[in-house]
Image (cartoon, rainbow, N blue to C red):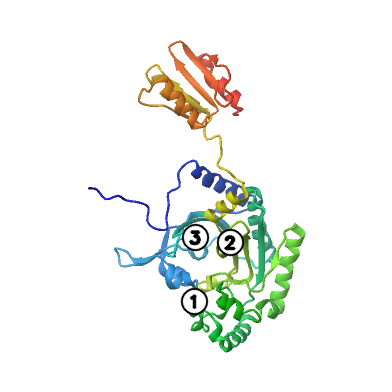
Amino acid sequence: MAPKFTAPKGTFDVLGPESARYEALVALFAQLAHRYGFELIVQPMFEDVGVFQRLGGSTDVVRKEMYDFEDKGGRHIALRPEGTAQAARAFLEHHPTPPWKVWYVGPKFRYDRPQKGRYRQHHEVGVEAIGTNDADVDVEVISLATDFYAALGVTRLKLRLTSLGDNVCRPAYRAELEAFLTERRDQLCGEHRDRISENPMRILDCKRAECVAATKDAPHMIDRLCEPCTVHFARVRAGLDAAGIAYVIDPSLVRGLDYYTRTTFEFEAAALESAQNAAGGGGRYDGLIEQLGGAPTPGIGFGLGIERILIACDAEGVFPAPADRLDAFVVDTTGGDAARDVARELRVAGVRVDRAFDNRSFKSQMTAALRSGARFAVVIEDAGITVRTLAEKGEPVAVDRANLVTTLTERLSIK
């Protein structure tokens, strides 16, 4: 007996009509990204593992979640777990004129325990703006994400915001936090008890009850910013206030990657389970390109998980699958030649068309037409051609073959 294959654990197939939601979501994001001056970048699905190791050795992505392997040429390769490091590598390789503003869409891979909204292969849309330290770019990036959620209809959303400082003010804070946590080592969860020195700030992001209680009174980076970081964060807040974008300052926000500096943010969807309610986020990474071997170059971006966004949409009853997948469905009882040619003519004219095959009966073809969700059925019989409105089940209208394309495009208002 042949083996029964299924999608690998932590992955899934997306079929219609759900796949139409993915398509519509990406199209909406692309429209907004272009409105903000971002251009598409198409990234490889794998890179030299060293690109992603620059994310930070204390991050779970690097320590235990990367899909990495040796290829047939002996190269150490990793499937991309995120998009920012790739964009930084592309910036260094191609030397675009800054500020370089790009958007992307595609799958990301992380070996993690699968659960609702968290998969080993998930899909993201995101942006990166590299080459400027202007706080107004931070505001634009956050505004784009906010506009995207609003366009989807997601309203039960909280924007968490903080500043993680820079290499001037953060070292002293890190030392202070490390000393604070060392005194409370026995109160931390088992995972972080012996990892304080790796990156003490990451412990602030731990959701386990032990770490939450132990860090309740921990010092916060936002209270120890240097003057330039304070001015930068104030400008970001002023821009968000001017745009009417609500936010909550959360000093405990760290996120899961070590490269973040200054402005850091996360969107929390109330419709998602509390343990996995992050619907996307991002921040500045002003030292990442330098870690990849380039000159010091500022950057900011975000990544938004498509699956989590759609779960939030479902919970709020918004952004359903598009209903009108097709404009017309061709039914042909004369042998199929006419259906072949008519479908071609209509598609060239911009009409979304499907048809039946295998010389099925009229009843079977009409059933397929109704199931397709098309607005019209173009019925071809020996007696002539009629156009039928499927949704309202109106009376058939006889149409000459020579006038079919014009008649149907006019009724569909296709220019």
Earlier sequence position, callout 2 versus callout 1: 1
**Rendered location of residue 104, percent (x, y):** 53, 55
Near mark 2 (Cα within 10 A), the count class, few <14, some 14-19 or many ≥20, is some
Per the rendering, the mark at residue 313 is none
Where residue 276 sits, quadrant-wise, is bottom right
**Front-most of 347 and 190?**
190
Please state which of residues 238 and 17 is positioned toward the viewer in this rendering: 17
Please tell me in which quadrant of the rendered image residue 390 appears. Answer: top right
- Of circles 3 and 1, the one toward us is 3
Q: Amino acid at mark 2?
A: Asn
Contact flag, marks 3 and 1 (Cβ < 8 Å): no
Q: Residue at x 72, y 78 (%)?
A: 227
Q: Secondary structure at mark 2?
A: loop
Residue at x 35% of width, y 25% of height: 358
Q: Amino acid at mark 3?
A: Arg
Which residue reaches farthest top?
383
- Of the numbered discs 2 and 3, the one sitting upstream in the chain is 3
Q: Distance of mark 3 from mark 1, alpha carbons? A: 21 Å
Question: What residue is shown with label 1?
Answer: 58
SS at circle 3:
loop
What amino acid type is highlighted by mark number 1?
Ser
Crowd rating for badge 3 (residues with CA inside 10 Å; few <14, some 14–19, many 20+): some
* Image position of 256 (left or right of 134): left
Between 1 and 302, the one nearer to me in the picture:
1
Q: Residues within 10 Å of mark 1 (few under 14, many from 20)?
A: some
According to the picture, the residue beneath numbered tag 2 turns out to be 277
Q: Earlier in the sequence, mark 3 or mark 1?
A: 1
